[in-house]
Image: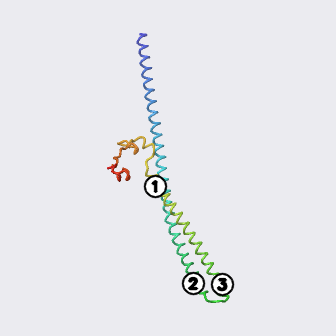
Amino acid sequence: MADTDDELAAKHAEEDEQQFDEEVELDALEERELIDNRRQREADADIADAMRRADVAERNHGYLRAKAADERLLGHADTAHAAHLRDGATGRDDAQSDADLKAADRAQARANSRYRTAADDDRRADWNYAEGREQRSRAEQPPAAEAVRSAPDEPPVARKNVKRPRDQRKKSKALREFGLGD
């Protein structure tokens, strides 16, 4: 009877150990799933953030382009006004012509300022366009962890190891002139 009690106790201990191992495996599996879900949520949040940034950059790009075009038009108008004032002041020698020349200088300075503002807006619009493209490509690129999990079908070939056929005609021109080359 003692043998059966010992065997029964050993059997229960073995079953308890198996049940414990199964629970540990299930806990580990659940933990891996939670970690994977958290990583997926983080990746989705990163993608959403990159898309939002790309949209903002594209919207700013359009706004700055329109603002630069408006500034450029105002600059053209100021330049035309300055030219008109200068043309009216030429050939006259009175106080009004001096005032017209000063007003023309102010209008031209205003036009130059508007042109600089337009150039700055164009530069910022270009930066926003590049930033939007970069953010959108970042959002479309799969995360590095995903790239590691799913390997490509064919391994990439390094360009430096690719054998290229040599062109036989590339021998020295000087050797060909002397009849030494092909």
The residue that appears at 44% across and 27% down in the rendered structure is 21
Residue at 49% across / 50% down in the picture? 46
- Residue 16: where, in percent of width, then height? 44, 23
What's the amino acid at mark 3? Ala
Q: CA distance from mark 2 to mark 1?
A: 48 Å
Secondary structure beneath label 1: helix
Q: Amino acid at mark 1?
A: Arg
Q: Earlier in the sequence, mark 1 or mark 3?
A: 3
Which is nearer the N-term, disc 2 or disc 3? 2
Residue 136: which numbered mark, if any?
Answer: 1
Up-down relation of residue 30 to residue 117 (above or below)? above
**Is the residue 15 above or below the residue 123 in the image?**
above
Crowding at label 3, few (<14), some or many (≥20) Cα neighbours within 10 Å?
few
Q: Quadrant of the N terminus?
A: top left
Residue 63 drawn at (x, y percent): 51, 66
> Along the line of sight, which residue is nearer the eye, 162 or 180?
180
Which mark, residue 99?
Answer: 3
